[in-house]
Image (cartoon, rainbow, N blue to C red):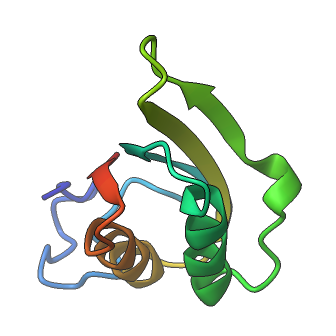
């Protein structure tokens, strides 16, 4: 867990227990097998949490052998709760291997 900057702030308060200043554009890296609908699936998940998500901002990198894709989603983050829920949704998708 990320510790608050101000020690007088309780770490039990999730709205204050972060070093991220909200709102902001936040990059999320996702890796998974290279399948036709992988990028579309990630785009749909991102739009659930960021309705203004721009699919044109997605960065895609292919693995050396071409079996996996590394995708960077740049979402508009409004809270730690939103990011946590997005990470959970991405991580629970069977196409996704890693979320950073």
Image quadrant in which you'd find residue 10: bottom left
Q: Residue at x 68, y 81 (%)?
A: 47
Please state if 48 lies on the left or on the right of 14 as rendered. right
Residue 75 in the image, given as x and y percentages of width and height: 66, 63
Viewed as shown, does residue 87 lie left or right of 20?
Answer: left
Residue 43 locus on image (x, y percent): 66, 69
Residue 25 visible within the image: no
In this rendering, position of residue 74 left or right of residue 69: right
Q: Is residue 71 left or right of residue 55?
A: left
Q: Residue furthest top?
A: 64
Near-viewer residue (76 or 5): 76
83 is higher (above) or lower (below) than 33? below
- Position in image of residue 62 (x %, y %): 55, 25
Residue at 50% x, 36% y is 69
Q: Classify the position of the N terminus by image quarter.
A: bottom left
Q: Quadrant of residue 26?
A: bottom right
The answer to which of 71 and 52 lies nearer the viewer is 71
């Amino acid at each position: 867990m990320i510790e608050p900057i101000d020690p007088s702030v309780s770490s039990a308060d999730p709205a204050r227990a972060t070093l991220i200043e909200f709102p902001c554009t936040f990059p999320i890296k996702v890796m998974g097998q290279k399948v036709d609908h992988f990028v579309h699936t990630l785009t749909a998940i991102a739009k659930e949490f960021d309705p203004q998500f721009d699919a044109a901002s997605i960065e895609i990198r292919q693995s050396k052998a071409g079996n996996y894709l590394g995708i960077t989603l740049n979402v508009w983050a409004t809270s730690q709760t939103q990011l946590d829920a997005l990470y959970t949704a991405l991580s629970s998708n069977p196409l996704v291997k890693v979320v950073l």
